[in-house]
Amino acid sequence: MGTPAEYGLNKQDVAIVQQLVREWKAGFPALRQLWQHRRGGPTGGGGTKIRLAQIAEVVTNQDYVTCSLLNQSTGIAATEGSEFEITVYARICGGTRLDRAAPKITIGGIFAVQQAKYDNAGTPEQRWYFVNNFQSTEEFIGENS
């Protein structure tokens, strides 16, 4: 373990990290979820499993993309069965298009996903969602891009 300066952190960076640690200890759910995932923890909020998925298709103008879940033992993407070519939905702040959102998604990219309940016109179902949120870039790139 080095000093904050050895990692290129100034006093403001250290204060931010300390605040994040305090929030995490207080139960900040998004940070706790990320921490558990980084440490190999098996579940996210509500006991749903966090899995890694590989992007399997070109991102379109939708809010979802096809992915394949990675085998938890081998790290290899599924090629058949219920973990092959699943639909993963994205929460996009300020937009609805994954092709105009950051972070960018490309074929072969790996993202953390988890299942969550979704009310489909009164019929509850489970959907896969990206753990992280996306930010629309539409206002920055314009409609003609």
Image: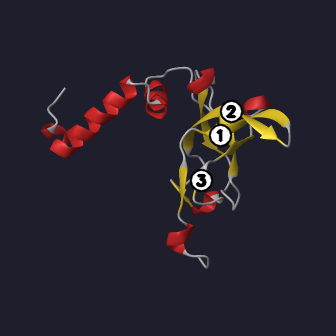
Q: Nearer the viewer, residue 50 or 84?
A: 50
Q: Position of residue 100 (x, y in %)?
A: 59, 63
Left or right of 44, for residue 124: right
Amino acid type for the residue under numbered disc 2: Ala
- Mark 1: secondary structure: strand
Label 1 Cα neighbours within 10 Å, binned few <14 / some 14-19 / many ≥20: many
- Give the mark, 3 or 1, whose residue is nearer the N terminus: 3
Query: Is residue 106 something one can see in this rendering?
Result: no
Left or right of 114, for residue 12: left
- Give the mark, 1 or 2, whose residue is nearer the N terminus: 2
Q: CA distance from mark 2 to mark 3?
A: 16 Å
Residue lying farthest bottom? 144
For marks 3 and 1, give the one nearer the viewer: 3
Q: Which residue is tagged 2?
A: 116
Label 2 Cα neighbours within 10 Å, binned few <14 / some 14-19 / many ≥20: some
Quarter of the rendering occupied by the N terminus: top left
Q: Which residue is tagged 3?
A: 92
Q: Position of residue 84 (x, y in %)?
A: 74, 35
- Mark 2: secondary structure: strand
- Give the mark, 2 or 3, whose residue is nearer the N terminus: 3
Q: Which residue is tagged 1?
A: 129
Residue depicted at 37% across the width and 30% down the height: 23
Label 1 close to label 2 by CB (< 8 Å): yes
Residue depicted at 44% across the width and 30% down the height: 28
Examine the image and state in which quarter residue 83 appears: top right
Q: CA distance from mark 1 to mark 2?
A: 7 Å
Quarter of the rendering occupied by the C terminus: bottom right
Amino acid type for the residue under numbered disc 3: Ile
Query: Is residue 125 something one can see in this rendering?
Result: yes
